[in-house]
Image (spheres, grey):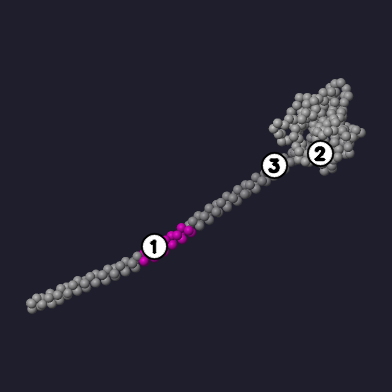
């Protein structure tokens, strides 16, 4: 059960999917209590859908082996393809919108026969065409934009083989030859050789860069060593100058301290002498007073 999700111009998102023999749609985001809408009850296989003119169009094969196209609007379903012989079946139903037209690509396969790839326009009954015939494969189609205009890319799901067609008009397809295997191998080998040369040149440049980096690193280390030596020399010179100034200051302080001590000693001796003189005068003066008394 694969979902296809579409968003219309008004911002409404819708999911389309098949389960069992039914085709369902539901609005997104899915609300609690809401139930998917059952669109068809005769589904067999090959559901595909596309957004065309702001409406979701879908196509599928029903239980009666008919190809049905329908929309999510009120338009009635229509039978596009029917009445295929017994032993044949529809394959690879694919809707595509191009410019103002809606296209259906499909295959009709029979046992032991190579299936062709065909196209029709569901809303223009006169347009029918053939993309390829007589080619074995289960083809998946995809419109692509090229420099020359619109193209149709066809991929075989079984072998992975690709075919590219120029899409001219409504149902006019002309195959454009793709690069042959030998040419592809030659270009691949040329690209590999060019890549190896570029890699070798890059390796040489890398070695040169590493050599230059090593030289720059060595020069940087030498400059750092030189700067460290200059810094240590400058620090040593400043330390010597500071210690010299400190020694001179210490000598000056010691000299001043010695002079102060010398002056203090002289003052102390002078004080002692003054005390001695004072005692003499006291003894002499007070001694006379006592004798008179």
Q: Residue at x 70, y 31 (%)?
A: 33
**Label 3 neighbourhood size at 10 Å, few (<14), some (14-19), many (20+)?**
few
**Residue 106 relative to residue 242: left or right:** right
Residue that carries the numbered disc 3 in the rendered image: 196
Is 232 located above or below residue 99 in the figure?
below
Magenta residues, start to end: 230-249
Q: Residue at x 78, y 39 (%)?
A: 8
Residue that carries the numbered disc 2 in the rendered image: 54
Q: Which structural element holds mark 1? A: helix
Q: Is 246 colored magenta in this rendering?
A: yes
Q: Which structural element holds mark 3? A: helix
**Mark 2 or mark 1, which has the lower sequence index?**
2
Image position, residue 190 (x, y; %): 75, 40
**Label 1 neighbourhood size at 10 Å, few (<14), some (14-19), many (20+)?**
few
- Asked whether the residues under the numbered discs 1 and 3 touch, taking CB atoms below 8 Å apart as contact, a structural biologist would say no
Q: Label 1, label 3: how many angstroms apart (C-alpha)?
A: 69 Å
- The answer to which of 23 and 210 lies nearer the viewer is 23
Q: Label 2, label 1: how many angstroms apart (C-alpha)?
A: 95 Å
- The answer to which of 147 and 124 lies nearer the viewer is 124
User: Residue 174: in sight, yes or no?
Assistant: no
Q: Which structural element holds mark 2? A: loop
Q: Residue at x 84, y 42 (%)?
A: 149
Q: Residue furthest top?
A: 86
Residue that carries the numbered disc 1 in the rendered image: 243
Image position, residue 291 (x, y; %): 7, 77
- Total numbered labels: 3
Image position, residue 203 (x, y; %): 65, 45
**Mark 2 or mark 3, which has the lower sequence index?**
2
């Amino acid at each position: 059960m694969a979902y296809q999700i579409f968003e219309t111009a008004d911002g409404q998102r819708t999911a389309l999917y098949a389960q069992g023999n039914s085709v369902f749609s539901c609005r997104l985001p899915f609300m609690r209590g809401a139930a998917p809408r059952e669109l068809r009850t005769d589904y067999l296989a090959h559901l595909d859908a596309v957004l065309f003119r702001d409406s979701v169009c879908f196509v599928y094969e029903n239980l009666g082996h008919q190809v049905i196209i329908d929309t999510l609007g009120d338009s009635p379903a229509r039978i596009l393809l029917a009445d295929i012989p017994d032993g044949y079946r529809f394959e690879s139903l694919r809707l595509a919108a191009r410019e103002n037209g809606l296209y259906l690509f499909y295959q009709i396969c029979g046992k032991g026969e190579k299936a062709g790839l065909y196209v029709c326009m569901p809303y223009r009954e006169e347009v029918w065409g053939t993309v390829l015939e007589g080619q074995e494969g289960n083809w998946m189609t995809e419109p692509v934009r090229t420099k020359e205009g619109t193209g149709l890319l066809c991929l075989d799901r079984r072998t992975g083989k690709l075919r590219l067609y120029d899409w001219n008009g409504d149902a006019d397809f002309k195959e454009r030859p793709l690069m042959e295997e030998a040419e592809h191998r030659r270009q691949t080998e040329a690209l590999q050789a060019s890549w190896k040369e570029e890699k070798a040149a890059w390796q040489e440049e890398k070695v040169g860069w590493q050599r230059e980096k090593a030289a720059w690193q060595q020069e940087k280390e030498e400059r750092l060593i030189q700067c460290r030596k200059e810094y240590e020399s400058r620090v040593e010179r400043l330390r010597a100058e500071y210690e010299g100034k400190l020694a001179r200051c210490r000598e000056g302080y010691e000299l001043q301290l010695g002079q102060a001590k010398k002056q203090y000693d002289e003052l102390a001796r002078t004080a002692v002498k003054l005390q001695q003189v004072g005692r003499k005068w006291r003894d002499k003066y007070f001694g006379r007073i006592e004798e008179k008394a």
